[in-house]
Image (cartoon, rainbow, N blue to C red):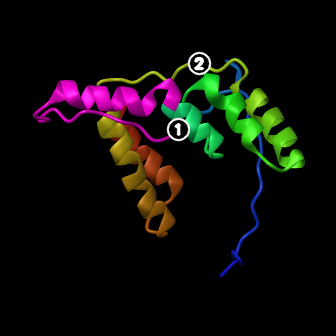
């Protein structure tokens, strides 16, 4: 049905001594180590992430990966109230943003984190326990 069983909302994340910090995640592309034709795969990825594809994505009302196409996305919104509020939200969210640092352990950590959260969602452990488990596994 059309009804959901919860109310949604948004809040700003707390700001620490180093300033605000949050992560914006999205889909990613990659080429497998055992890919038989890496050059062709890289060309496909270049086309998928290129300016023309990103412009098309933005024009369809989907948030693009390329920052240059974000105004195209916002312009594609039909509802003026939504357009005004989303524009303000994105400008505030991206102010002072920096690129995410990725380490050699990134894939292992990014796979382990959601797995730990399953136990929290199911009530088998607390968030504190899940974070302690991750810290003991990856903490230095």
> Which residue carries the number 2 mark?
98
- Report whether 114 appears left or right of 59: left
The quadrant of the picture occupied by the C terminus is top left
Q: Position of residue 61 (x, y in %)?
A: 66, 46
- Asked if residue 20 shows in the view, the reply is yes
> Front-most of 132 and 88?
88
> Front-most of 139 and 67?
67
Question: Going from the N terminus, do you reach mark 1 or mark 2 first?
Answer: 1
- Report whether 99 appears left or right of 81: left
Label disc, if present, on residue 70 of the rendered structure? none
The outermost residue toward the right is: 81
Q: Is residue 24 above or below residue 3?
A: above
Q: Position of residue 134 (x, y in %)?
A: 38, 43
In this picture, which residue range is highlighted in magenta? 25-52
The quadrant of the picture occupied by the N terminus is bottom right
Label disc, if present, on residue 25 of the rendered structure? 1
Q: Is residue 119 above or below residue 90?
A: below
Determine the secondary structure under disc 2.
loop
Is residue 109 inside the magenta stretch? no
The residue that appears at 72% across and 29% down in the rendered structure is 71
| Tally of numbered tags | 2
Q: Position of residue 10 (x, y in %)?
A: 76, 49
- Quadrant in which residue 93 is drawn: top right
The residue that appears at 48% across and 61% down in the rendered structure is 120
Determine the secondary structure under disc 1.
loop
Is residue 34 inside the magenta stretch? yes
- Quadrant in which residue 55 is drawn: top right
């Amino acid at each position: 049905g059309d009804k959901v069983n919860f109310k949604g909302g948004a809040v700003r994340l707390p700001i620490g001594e180093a300033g605000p910090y949050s992560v914006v995640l999205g889909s990613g592309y990659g080429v497998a180590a055992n890919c038989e034709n890496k050059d062709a795969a890289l060309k496909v990825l270049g086309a998928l992430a290129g300016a023309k594809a990103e412009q098309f994505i933005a024009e369809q009302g989907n948030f693009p990966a390329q920052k240059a196409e974000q105004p195209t996305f916002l312009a594609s919104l039909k509802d003026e109230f939504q357009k005004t509020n989303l524009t303000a939200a994105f400008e505030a969210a991206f102010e002072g943003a920096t690129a995410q640092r990725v380490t050699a352990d990134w894939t292992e950590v990014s796979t382990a984190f959601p797995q730990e959260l399953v136990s929290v969602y199911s009530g088998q452990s607390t968030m504190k326990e899940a974070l302690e488990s991750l810290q003991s596994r990856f903490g230095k």
